[in-house]
Image: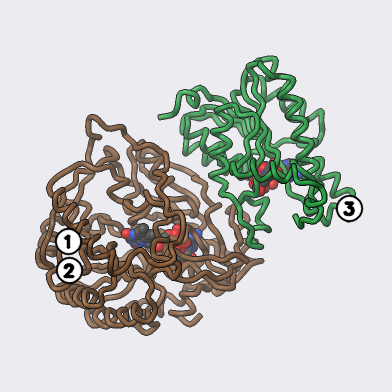
Chain colours: A green, B brown
């Protein structure tokens, strides 16, 4: 039924498990035979609906859900310690929220909040997991960044800066753990059809399907790819954007 | 605003797309954004799922499974779940949807709203017959649990209700047990309509699935291929239980500048298809996917009709007039030289309708695709409409983009009753065209 590499995946931990992207990843893992899920998010009600869905897909699975704290470092530490009393094969850190750039420019507290939830919070979670997972010398830690973290742009540089923080952090962590049994993966989605981009969809933006993005992530994690651009065309697009000379870049309305 | 089309690609009009993701949040979204109409997979051919320059509620994000009872086979799921996803999950466990149309790339909500039928109407009726309960969100904030025991009238109106009674949030579907993913099949060539009707009747008692492909250009001496099948208790010894999950990879990559289906391509194709299948006459074994959903293997096949899109004309005519009416239609189509290779002829069984506006009736249904050639195509439809109306038949809303409102009104007598159950916050291109609002 499942491929050999997939059948070894048994325990999955997802932080920000109510994310549409994370939810579609969880379904794939359930269908591939994962037997234990630990789902952390801020809303227990939303988590219950997701757990029910996974349970139908994988009746044997044991699914634990918990509403958690995403801000306080001590709380993050103790939650992760508790989660990791059992080893995990895959940990996915998925939470994030797309702030309005104009509002960020008008309010420092908006900016602080955006950097907190998109940058600091995922990095603190990742660091807490990394310590325990590198001791165990096994498992894969995947963090969702964004193509927006590749180069600051006027349309969303506060969000981009926070995602850039995640990018640099993961790079360092990959450097630190290179060659060990513990793998670290950075996921960089392009614009994807999820609740986070609902307002863009309303305006008619072209968005990737969340199923396709999740398929790429699940496959990329199974292969232990260090960086997953999804859809894959974004690797090329962002390479060009990163390398555009400033005099051209500054004239672009992006 | 985003340009939306349905499967026939006849129009491409801007819509304000509101994505529904969380069934608890739908009430608020509807209150804020209305009037609108649900859009599932847009696999309807005409304007039933469109609301040009207005609001489109996109239901695909509402695709959670909620509960499955492995003793009774009842699956509760959200309305944006795909039939394919349900089948992929459940067939290996020995359960299947009792009724599916010729594609499984549609949503549960779409299957209910058009009360779709499959190849086994004489045994299992329509999709709506297997819906035990549904939860309906009205735009005024009311949420109704509907079944034959509770809000039964609203239940009957919502099945085949074309999305006009509310947004279906979730449904309880009674699956049927199957021994395997495989079918025993039998293929027969036929050379005349009486022969087709004989085969149909003779097959009803012993075969669950019956359908036929008919050469729409064969005119007065129709020839076709009759297919029938039953579920196998066991997979054949040398087969895996499920073909690989991988997509076939066949995709129509772009819209050709003109329809690839035209006079030049049609005759040789139909002749070849007939000859090829005639050679396959007799019994065989088939996996359910290629047998039930042959076109699902080719992504975007609807693009082959070119930039002007295409119509599907699907009618049903009652038993007492079906022989003559089907013959007349085939003659008219043959003379016009229009039509396409996707012509399907089958009979419906005698089953009470599940919904107020359900399409099937005891009789024969003919479905054909027509590349859009403007007035020429529409004139042919007017001729076909006359035959259908005179025979006491009707057209299928899921496929329609052009039938006259009078024809709809006279063919669906329950329409005036249905109007009482409409949600005033819902309107579609089709409802305005056929019901005036
Ligand atoms: C290749 C092919 C073969 C087909 N074969 C058959 C066949 O054999 N038999 C048959 O009966 N049909 C057949 N069809 C038609 C198809 O099954 C129907 O049009 C079906 O309703 C499409 O479902 P959808 O999810 O794409 O819905 P859409 O086309 O997007 O919408 C259809 C209707 O459902 C409503 N709707 C969708 N979701 C909801 C919801 N949550 N709540 C309320 N209303 C909702 C919409 O408003 C609209 O009125 C075929 C179509 C194709 C493309
Ligand atoms: N969609 C895209 O186009 C896109 C592109 C690039 C990167 N990404 C990244 O992909 C990840 C997943 O996003 P998605 O697209 O799946 O969006 P989503 O469905 O909106 O999910 C966002 C997730 O973040 C959580 N979250 C948001 N704000 C929070 C807060 N203040 N505290 C705690 N949790 C919070 C949400 O919880 P609730 O469910 O409780 O709200 C939800 O679990 C994010 O990191 C996002 O930045 C998305």
User: Neighbour class for label 3 at 10 Å: few (<14), some, many (≥20)?
Assistant: few
The answer to whether the residues at label 1 and label 2 have Cβ atoms under 8 Å apart is yes
The N terminus of chain A, quarter of image: top left
The verdict on a common chain for dots 1 and 2 is yes
Percent of width and height locating residue A19 = 64, 43
Q: Nearer the viewer, mark 2 or mark 3?
A: 2
The verdict on a common chain for dots 2 and 3 is no
Spatial distance from mark 1 to mark 2, Cα to Cα? 9 Å
Kindly indicate the quadrant of the structure image that contains residue B270: bottom left
A236 up-or-down from B103: above or below? above
- Chain letter of the residue carrying label 2: B
User: Neighbour class for label 1 at 10 Å: few (<14), some, many (≥20)?
Assistant: many
Which of the pair B46/B359 is nearer the observer?
Answer: B46
The image's mark for residue B218 is 2
Q: Residue furthest bottom?
A: B406
* Mark toward the start of the polypeptide (1 vs 2): 2
How many numbered marks does the figure carry?
Answer: 3
Task: For residue B113, say whether it is visible.
Answer: no
Q: What element carries label 2?
A: loop
- Chain letter of the residue carrying label 1: B
Percent of width and height locating residue B161 = 43, 68
Spatial distance from mark 1 to mark 3, Cα to Cα? 71 Å
The residue at 74%/49% (across/down) is A98
From the image, tell me which residue sits under label 1: B224
The C terminus of chain A, quarter of image: bottom right
From the image, tell me which residue sits under label 3: A107
Q: What element carries label 1?
A: strand
Which of the pair B408/A119 is nearer the observer?
Answer: A119
Q: Is residue B85 left or right of residue A154?
A: left
- Chain letter of the residue carrying label 3: A
């Amino acid at each position: 039924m499942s491929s050999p590499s997939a059948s070894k995946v048994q325990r999955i931990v997802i932080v920000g498990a109510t994310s549409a992207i994370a939810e579609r990843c969880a379904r794939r893992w359930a269908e591939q035979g994962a037997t234990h899920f630990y789902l952390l998010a801020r809303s227990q009600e939303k988590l219950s609906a997701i757990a029910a869905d996974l349970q139908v897909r994988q009746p044997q699975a044991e699914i634990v859900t918990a509403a958690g704290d995403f801000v306080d470092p001590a709380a993050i530490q103790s939650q992760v310690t508790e989660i990791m009393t059992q080893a995990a094969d895959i940990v996915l850190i998925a939470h994030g929220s797309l702030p309005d750039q104009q509002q960020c420019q008008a309010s420092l507290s908006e900016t602080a909040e955006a950097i907190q939830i998109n940058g600091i919070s995922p990095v603190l979670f990742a660091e807490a997991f990394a310590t325990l997972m590198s001791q165990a010398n096994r498992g894969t830690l995947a963090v969702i960044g964004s193509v927006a973290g590749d180069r600051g742009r006027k349309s969303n540089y506060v969000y981009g800066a926070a995602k850039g923080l995640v990018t640099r952090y993961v790079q360092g962590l990959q450097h630190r753990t290179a060659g060990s049994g513990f793998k670290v993966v950075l996921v960089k989605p392009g614009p994807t059809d999820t609740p986070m981009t609902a307002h863009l969809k309303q305006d008619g933006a072209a968005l990737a399907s969340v199923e396709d993005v999740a398929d790429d992530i699940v496959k990329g994690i199974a292969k232990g790819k260090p960086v997953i651009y999804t859809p894959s065309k974004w690797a090329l697009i962002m390479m060009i954007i990163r390398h555009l000379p400033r005099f051209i870049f500054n004239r672009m309305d992006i | 605003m985003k340009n939306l089309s349905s499967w026939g690609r006849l129009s491409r009009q801007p819509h304000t797309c509101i994505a529904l993701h969380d069934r608890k949040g739908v009430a608020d979204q509807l209150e804020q954004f209305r009037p609108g109409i649900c859009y599932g997979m847009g696999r309807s051919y005409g304007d039933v799922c469109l609301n040009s320059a207005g609001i489109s509620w996109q239901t695909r994000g509402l695709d959670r499974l909620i509960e499955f009872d492995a003793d009774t086979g009842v699956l509760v799921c959200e309305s944006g779940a795909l039939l394919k996803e349900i089948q992929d999950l459940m067939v290996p466990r020995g359960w299947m949807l009792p009724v599916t149309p010729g594609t499984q790339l549609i949503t549960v909500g779409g299957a209910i709203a058009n009360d779709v039928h499959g190849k086994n109407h004489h045994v299992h009726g329509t999709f709506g017959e297997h819906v035990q309960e549904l939860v309906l969100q009205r735009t005024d904030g009311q949420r109704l649990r509907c079944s034959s025991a509770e809000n039964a009238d609203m239940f009957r109106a919502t099945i085949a209700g074309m999305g006009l009674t509310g947004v279906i949030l979730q449904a309880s579907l009674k699956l049927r047990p199957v021994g395997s993913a495989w079918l025993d099949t039998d293929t027969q060539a036929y050379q005349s309509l009486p022969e087709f009707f004989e085969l149909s009747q003779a097959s009803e008692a012993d075969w669950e699935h019956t359908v036929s492909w008919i050469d729409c250009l064969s005119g007065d001496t129709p020839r076709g291929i009759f297919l029938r099948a039953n579920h196998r208790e066991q997979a054949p010894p040398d087969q895996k239980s499920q073909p690989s999950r991988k997509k076939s990879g066949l995709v129509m990559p772009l819209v050709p500048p003109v329809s690839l289906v035209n006079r030049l391509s049609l005759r040789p194709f139909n002749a070849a298809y007939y000859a090829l299948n005639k050679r396959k006459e007799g019994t065989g074994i088939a996996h359910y996917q290629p047998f039930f959903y042959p076109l699902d293997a080719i992504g975007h096949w609807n693009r082959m009709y070119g930039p002007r899109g295409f119509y599907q004309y699907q009618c049903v005519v009652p038993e007492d007039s079906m022989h003559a009416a089907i013959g007349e239609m085939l003659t008219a189509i043959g003379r016009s030289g229009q039509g396409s290779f996707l012509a399907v002829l089958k009979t419906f069984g005698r089953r009470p309708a599940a919904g107020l506006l359900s399409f099937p009736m005891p009789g024969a249904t003919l479905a054909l695709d027509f590349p859009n050639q403007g007035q020429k195509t529409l004139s042919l439809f007017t001729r076909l409409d006359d035959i259908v109306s005179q025979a006491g038949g009707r057209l299928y809303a899921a496929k329609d983009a052009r039938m006259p409102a009078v024809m709809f009104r006279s063919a669906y007598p329950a329409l005036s009753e249905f109007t009482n159950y409409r949600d005033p916050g819902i309107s579609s291109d089709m409802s305005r065209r056929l019901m005036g609002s």
